[in-house]
Amino acid sequence: MRTVRRYLAREIYRSTFVVVLALLGLFTFFTLVDELDTVGVNLPVTSLFYLQALAMPTRLYDLLPIGLLIGTILALAGLAQRNELVILRVSGISANAFVGMLWLISVPIMAGALILSEFITPAAEIKSSEANMLLRGRVEGGMLNSGYWFREPAKDGGTRVINVGRMLASGNVADLKMYEFDRNQKLTVMSQAKTGHFDNGQLTMSEVTQHKVAQNSRDFLSDAIVRKDPLMTLEQSPTRSIDTSLTAERLVARILTPERMSVTALSDYIAYLNKNQLQADRQIVAIWRKLSYPFTLLVMMTIAAPISFMQTRRGGIGAKVFIGILCGTGFFMINQLALNVGLLYKWPPVVTALLPNTAAMVLALATMLSIEHRQSLAAMKVPYMFWKKSAI
């Protein structure tokens, strides 16, 4: 059994490596062609290659499940074409044992995918975001036309709303606005700063202009009396520092796709959102999806098993690979649909994350068991058919 498992592992690893490498190169080439229009003085070709190199781990993270599915189908279909799967079945390896071997073979891939998901991809995404901000002066994720918005409680019991116009590298920001409200949610101060820096739990703003609203501002509008006291006072200062719960990491978390973050960073960002009474459903679902990512690879290998057992006369390797591509694409669409529907109808995060994987696993196992059952029935009819033929 160990020899058979090693042989299957070698075939599957080799096919999967070739398929993933081909998909990675193909998608990178298409992205490079699409981005060539952005090449100019500020973004030379070498910088574009650098950005694409930083995008490789994220692209690998996205392509690994379907690459594993196609690679496993290619390996097993090749074994079936050479009648090696028939030899395995005749030697007494049942469908359950065969699926169990595939699951054991997937363990090293799942371990590598966990390292990719938790360490390599988040680090590459942060580097890619910083490079985009440095080379292109922008980063797209989570940005409104007015910039990025954050809300947090102030020490005096009020509320502080921070608007970041542009994010720069290394925790620096630009075009900063801050609105401070008292306990009664009345605006007291509106500050504008040219630049800012988040470090050690503090926000240090430079070239600050403060607009302080008078405490009795409502009285100014309640009657037509002209008052001597100003409604608003203007103050300018070179710097201003405030204590804040925002950090450079949480700023980056705002612009990254939740699935591209590490579980540790996601947990920290969810704690920040919950503390400030902000919506965190998307991030909670992302944690469950990241935890289920290795299970997704297991599902892909399980789906490949019944496809590879298709009879060759019903379609060769090309037909099986085409079916695998359809299954992988359909699974991706259903997974994304479940995410959107789950967020829309407030499904529990664990259901939103695990429902497509669980349904695909049950369907694949049921198909594999039906193949096993059909073959057993056919084997039971063989003696009767030979007996009937000899009688004639």
Image (spheres, grey):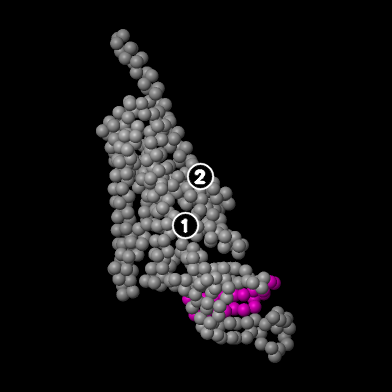
The local secondary structure at tag 2 comes to helix
Q: Which residue is mark 2?
A: 355
Q: Position of residue 301 (x, y in %)?
A: 39, 41
Tag 2–tag 1 contact (CB < 8 Å) = no
| Occupied quadrant, residue 224 | bottom right
Look at 28% across and 31% down and name the residue there.
83
Residue at the left extreme of this rendering: 82
Closest to the observer, 180 or 314: 180
Q: Is residue 46 left or right of residue 117?
A: left
Look at 44% across and 35% down and name the residue there.
365
Q: Is residue 43 left or right of residue 272?
A: left
Does residue 314 appear in the picture of this structure?
A: no
Residue range highlighted in magenta: 174-194
Circle number at residue 198: none
Give the alpha-carbon distance from disc 2 to disc 1, as whole Å.
Answer: 22 Å
| Occupied quadrant, residue 318 | top left
Q: Is residue 45 left or right of residue 123?
A: left
Look at 32% across and 54% down and name the residue there.
24
Q: Is 349 colored magenta in this rendering?
A: no
Counting residues from the N terminus, which is met first, the one under dot 2 or under dot 1?
A: 1
Q: Position of residue 276 (x, y in %)?
A: 60, 64
The local secondary structure at tag 1 comes to loop
Q: Position of residue 223 (x, y in %)?
A: 73, 83
Compared to 10, does 24 lie above or below?
A: below
Please identify the quadrant where the N terminus is shown. top left
Look at 45% across and 39% down and name the residue there.
361
Q: Which residue is mark 1?
A: 262
**Crowd around label 2: few <14 · some 14–19 · many ≥20 (10 Å):** some
Please identify the quadrant where the C terminus is shown. top left
Select label 2 or label 1 by which is in front.
1
Amino acid type, mark 2:
Leu
Amino acid type, mark 1:
Ser
